[in-house]
Amino acid sequence: MYYQNRAPRKRTRDYFMPFFIIIIIIAIIFFGWRTLNQVFIDDNRTTFSEKVFLSIENGSAKAMTVGNGDWDNAPDNIYLYKGEKLKTGSDGRVSLTFTDKSIVRLDNNTQIDLVQLSKKNDANVIEVSLVNGQIWSQIERIFHPDSRFTISTDLIAVDTKGGDIAVEAPGTVYVLDGTAQVSVKFEDEIIKTINVGVGQQLVIDSDTIASINEGTEPDLIFALSESFKSSEWYRWNTKKDGAINAFEESDNEDAETDETETTDEDNETEQASTDEETSINPDRMVSITKPSSNSATSSSEISIEGVYDSEKVQAVYIDGKKASLLEKNKWKISKLTLVTEGENKLKVEAEDLSGAKVQLDSFIITYDKTPPAVPVITNPGANDETVTIDDVEQMIEGTVSGDTYVVIVNDYRLSKYVPGSKEFSYYAKTAYGNLEVGENEYEVIAEDKAGNKSESAKIILVLEQDTVDEAGGDEEVTEEDDSSVTSATETPVPVATSTGGVTITEPNGGESFTTSETEFDIKGTVPAGTETVEVNDYKLSLYEAGDSTFRYSAKASFKNLTIGEKNEYVVKAYDESGKVLGSASITIDVESGSAAAPTITMPSSSASYTTSLNEVVLGGDVGKWTDKVYVNGEKLTDYIPGSEQWRKTVTLNPGENTFTVKGEMDGVQTSSVSITITYTQ
């Protein structure tokens, strides 16, 4: 019998097996190539430590990535790597989060280069170069001896082992927490190293570098300036850091506010940050909001307040004493005793929901009972002297000790005195009303950060009637300073008023006056039962019912004080039913002075500058009387008279670009200053 051989019957898997094999081969090739690419080709992006995470907070930003010489729009939530560059636009603000959880924020018109991002044997080495603008860095504590976090500019290199450090190009450093070691550079060589402590600021420019090279030691370190602490950049960052800042308040904030430390600035500037709610930094279980860290007090008993994360914390302890937990995630400890005169490092602990205690960064406060030394008057005479002067205006000058925070002359706090400076000056003028015919006694007092006041230094100036008559008597007083002329025949400054227990105590003791200053804090008292306080019909949002004091900021830069006019401020106190309890008024006559020529400090204070960027920020200082600023004939629309600063972002053409800056006051232009910027492609 014959049987025919049949071919084996194919199963379904026999048809699909070749396709599976092909897919596996392709996968092996793909993943193998990806691994080789990461290990051998893309050497700049091999480890997680060599990248940072970008978050765009506001506006726009541009990045120049490795291998790409063009600036491209940077999307939100991407990684940047070593060697790449980042810059913000005029409306842009961004945050960079590093692998060690450190955070660096860039302000508007700011550029940085990521110079170093490396990790070796558990040591992180990070260097950020600030080309222009300003940054705020919240650096995590560094424990590894070989780790470092450096922020560099053309003039300085800032190293820190942790803390909150703000840097403004080309050479200003603000230390808000921790310490910083600043290396001053000249022609890429370090010529001086300076340690900057918490609560201090360091200012380096080309002039100070020249002085250092010449062997002189100019004053470089000062206490944090009030202008920085009241700036919108400071307010925005402290809110981002999770602390309730003494200079701001959220819409629903009803925390107790120390009127002697806060300013009511909400209505004077239109700032997006005032609309944000106070938040708690998720990485901070407990924050202390009052008093500020590294502050000082003359009292042995203090109260400490703060906020806490209720989702993580059930109790707060300061030096073993348990805090009272209040509404809205707030806590407070009253009558905490400081046992050591000098620096007190208080232990801060948070008890988590499981009952375990977590030790946090210590809180440092200085208990200081020692007042500053007595001021020394050097001009026009010495302490306790009586001097006859031959002019209707006289500058009183002198020195104070380095621990001086405020200088007070006849109850007037000198607004231009920089804390920590060893020199002061006070202008006495017949036109100001603080110099009259006969004997004029001036009492100078120095006050330190803790509020201790020195004994007073006194000098008596004798102004004779003949001198006034020679200067023009009551008919006219010529003021040679600032090239301005005032006349006593003009409408006098209205007399200050006070009724119903409402008083104005500052400035000038509440009396109306004439001045050349452009910013003031108006302070005073209100009677018991005051529910709300208004200044020129504006309700003070930081005033709390029952407080006995109020504070209001009047500044030319806030547009609530006008240069060249008599500015009247009327304070009214209302009870719970809306009835007026009393009122007080003061008139501040702000004279116009001469407009000093602008200066250029950004991107360099020298007459020439070379860059590989096609866009840079020009900026500098200008006289406070200047009402207009022009760059190459174009008026700056965002310049605010009285702000004393100007900025403009300019686009460069290849080669040399010359920019000329002029100011203008009342139609008269100042002299000009120029810079030539060479753009190399």
Image: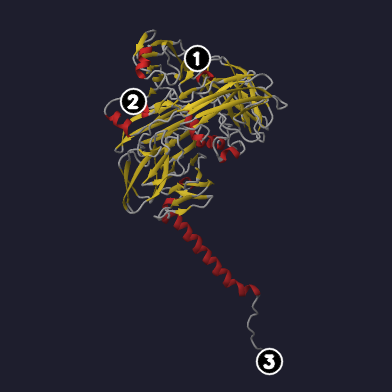
Q: Which quarter of the picture shows residue 469?
A: top left
Quadrant into which the N terminus falls: bottom right
Q: Nearer the viewer, mark 1 or mark 3?
A: 1
Q: CA distance from mark 3 to mark 2?
A: 120 Å
Q: Which quarter of the picture shows residue 416?
A: top left
Name the spot of residue 342 as percent of width and height, x first. 49, 16
**Dot 3 lies on which element?**
loop
Task: Identify the residue under disc 2.
Answer: 218
Could you tell which of marks 1 and 3 lies nearer the N-terminus? 3
Q: CA distance from mark 1 to mark 3?
A: 126 Å
Q: Which of 49/561 is in front? A: 561
Contact flag, marks 1 and 3 (Cβ < 8 Å) = no
The disc label shown at residue 1, or none: 3
Q: Which of 556/333 is in front? A: 556
Could you tell which of marks 1 and 2 lies nearer the N-terminus? 2
CA neighbours of label 3 inside 10 A, class few (<14), some (14 to 19), many (20+): few
Name the spot of residue 574 as percent of width and height, x first. 67, 25
**Type of residue at label 1?**
Asn
**Type of residue at label 2?**
Pro
Q: Which of 559/109 is in front? A: 559
Quadrant into which the C terminus falls: bottom left
Q: Is residue 152 visible?
A: no
**Dot 2 lies on which element?**
loop
Q: Which of 652/277 is in front? A: 652
**Type of residue at label 3?**
Met
Name the spot of residue 33 as percent of width and height, x first. 47, 61
Q: How is the image coloured?
A: secondary structure
Q: Which quarter of the picture shows residue 672?
A: top left
